[in-house]
Amino acid sequence: MSDTILETDGLTKEFMGFVAVGDVSLKIRRGSIHGLIGPNGAGKTTCFNLLTKFLQPTRGTIRYDGRDITGMKPAEVARLGLVRSFQISAVFPHLSVLENVRVALQRQRGGSFDFWRSESLLKQYDDRAMALLADVGLSGYEHLAAGELPYGRKRALEIATTLAMEPQMMLLDEPTAGMTHEDVDRIVALVRRVAVGRTVLLVEHNLKVVSGLCDTITVLTRGRILAEGDYQAVAKNPEVVAAYLGTEAHTVTEGVPV
Ligand SMILES: Nc1ncnc2c1ncn2[C@@H]1O[C@H](COP(=O)(O)OP(=O)(O)O)[C@@H](O)[C@H]1O
Ligand SMILES: [Mg+2]
């Protein structure tokens, strides 16, 4: 088994000639938490969409767990264990917290949404769903409508529905965006917990979160890799500091214990 779980070579995505992601060659170590950071518009989300096959690259290749997945469909790569955390909009607000995880489990087993199954059949997923909810700290919330969860808990539910896919590698796009301090701490602990035995690729704006969680960091600007290394190395890189100037320079240089 190779030490590298995911590798891209010359990954490029152009939108009408505009290079959103240009010549990105990434190597992600199996079992690591890898951060992808960079100013707004750097191409982080586009990268995620390329890796999970929601977008087809203009050029370049993607290898995951020993195979070329460049031509695959999103559902195929998800079945191989490369799963992107669902967006909040994909949480069904009128279903209970428990039902949301059940639907995700059912989708994992059945390969499609299937609302026509009887209640009794759905119940077979309850034990597993309850265990997943416990994993993400949502025990006690199972009968609440998902739409009524506080914001931070919604992200935890999103992670639970992602875990239902039994990911070998999880991609999280800004899991702490818009959160209070308390929620941020809870999500950091949660990401650390769910990263055990898997690989995590994390896009995150909060550099404290990045420094606390990530083993390796890739810095993107204007679609290209600017720097790579552990947090201490990239935070000291003058080009990285310059790229963040006017936006997050204070966080890079002062806010984080390096
Ligand atoms: N579907 C699209 N069509 C045209 N331009 C896009 C599209 N998606 C993203 N972009 C552009 O690509 C660049 C990178 O966007 P994005 O990947 O969302 O950046 P980030 O997630 O780092 O903020 C931005 O300039 C954005 O406007
Ligand atoms: Mg983004």
Image (tube, rainbow, N blue to C red):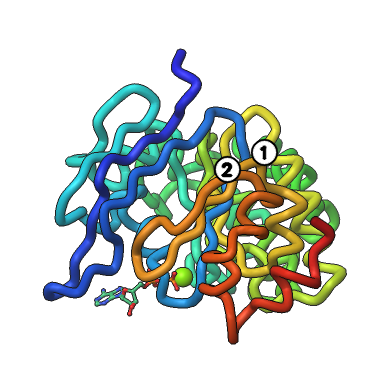
User: Residue 177 location in percent, x, y?
Assistant: 64, 73
Residue 123 higher or lower than 5, as above or below: below
Q: Residue at x 57, y 43 (%)?
A: 200
For the residues labelled 2 and 1, the Cα–Cα distance comes to 6 Å
Q: Quadrant of residue 158?
A: bottom right
Circles 2 and 1 in contact, beta carbons < 8 Å = yes
State which tag comes first along the sequence, 2 or 1. Answer: 1
Q: Quadrant of the C terminus?
A: bottom right
On screen, residue 214 versus residue 24, left or right, reads: right
**Could you say which quadrant of the image residue 146 lies in?**
bottom right
The residue to which callout 2 is attached is: 200
The answer to whether any part of residue 21 appears in the image is yes
Q: Position of residue 5 (x, y in %)?
A: 45, 29
The front one of 114 and 85 is: 85
| Most foreground residue, 220 or 166 | 220
Q: Is residue 67 above or below residue 53?
A: above
- Residue at label 1? 195
Q: Whole-percent x and y of residue 129?
A: 66, 43
Position of 81 compared to 98: left or right?
Answer: left
Left or right of 20? Residue 196 is right
